[in-house]
Image (cartoon, rainbow, N blue to C red):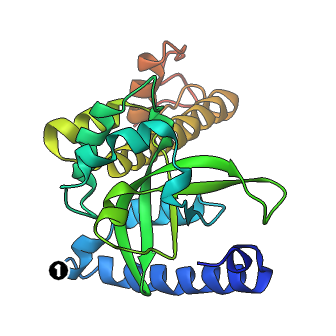
């Protein structure tokens, strides 16, 4: 891919438009829950990746890879691309402090107009076709198998426990992370709603607490006035 293609605003806009269309197709396919849908993440993960990615990332020429990737290229070349589990061994070989886990990204590669779920490494490179550091992708398996992705989109996992679980039970790290994140956000919303209900109840009807609100208050160590006093006596 020519440097001008990266830096040309019109070309990048076209890439984003293409990506939006491809992810729209993937979003529709996910709900079918058939063989085709297994090419994509689950719906929640798919939405998270789309909403939390702010740049397109391009393949970095092999000659410019950091030395650790150059040294271990031959050790992982026999693995299958784009199966993300193949990078488990790669991360064992070139693990921290040689290569930070933050470089390992999970997302999509766009190859010949097709969206492919994959795993890849990202480094920040100052390139001569733009003024700021650009996320550039190192993907040894793609190079070895002669694949030429146009560009990538993805993100790292902030907690290494999801990568360890990936190795133990095969659950994809991004799916595990997003699932936990969604559950925590749901729990936080329920907690905030319950706290608001508690204070509202204490303000207007302190002697008429619903049973579930009493249970919540006791769990949180909150004061609950004696219930059933007139004129709030329960029937």
Is residue 70 in view? yes
Q: How many marks?
A: 1
Above or below 225: residue 78: below
Q: Residue 48 in the image: x percent, y percent?
A: 50, 59
Question: With 121 as the anchor, is 38 left or right in this view?
Answer: left
Task: Name the quarter where the N terminus is drawn.
Answer: bottom right
The quadrant in which residue 162 appears is top left
From the viewer's perspective, is 203 left or right of 71? Answer: right
Residue at position x 49%, y 31% from top? 209
Residue shown at 45% from the left, 43% from the top: 181
Residue 128's place in the image compared with 71, above or below, is below
Left or right: residue 81 versus residue 188 is left
The residue carrying pointer 1 sits among few (fewer than 14), some (14 to 19) or many (20 or more) residues within 10 Å by Cα, namely few
Quadrant position of the C terminus in the picture? top left
Relative to residue 172, is residue 111 depicted above or below?
below
Q: Nearer the viewer, residue 107 or 46?
A: 107
Q: Residue at left 31%, top 63%?
A: 144
Image coordinates of residue 114 in percent, x first then y, are 39, 83
Residue that mark 1 sits on: 34
């Amino acid at each position: 891919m020519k440097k001008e293609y990266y830096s040309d605003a019109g070309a990048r806009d076209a890439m984003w438009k293409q990506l939006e269309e491809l992810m729209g197709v993937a979003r529709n396919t996910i709900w079918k829950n058939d063989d085709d849908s297994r090419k994509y993440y689950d719906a929640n993960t798919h939405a998270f990746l789309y909403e939390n990615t702010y740049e397109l990332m391009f393949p970095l020429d092999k000659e410019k890879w950091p030395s650790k990737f150059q040294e271990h290229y031959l050790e992982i070349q026999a693995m299958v691309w784009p199966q993300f589990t193949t990078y488990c061994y790669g991360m064992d070989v070139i693990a921290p402090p040689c290569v930070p886990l933050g470089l390992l990204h999970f997302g999509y590669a766009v190859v010949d107009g097709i969206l492919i779920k994959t795993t890849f490494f990202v480094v920040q490179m100052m390139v001569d076709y733009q003024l700021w550091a650009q996320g550039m992708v190192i993907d040894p398996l793609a190079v070895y198998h002669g694949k030429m992705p146009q560009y990538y989109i993805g993100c790292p996992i902030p907690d290494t426990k999801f990568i360890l679980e990936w190795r133990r039970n095969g659950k994809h790290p991004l799916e595990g992370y997003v699932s936990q994140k969604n559950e925590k956000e749901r729990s936080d919303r329920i907690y905030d709603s319950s706290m608001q209900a508690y204070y509202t109840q204490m303000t207007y009807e302190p002697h008429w607490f619903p049973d579930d609100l009493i249970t919540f208050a006791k769990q949180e160590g909150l004061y609950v006035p004696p219930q059933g006093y007139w004129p709030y006596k329960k029937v």
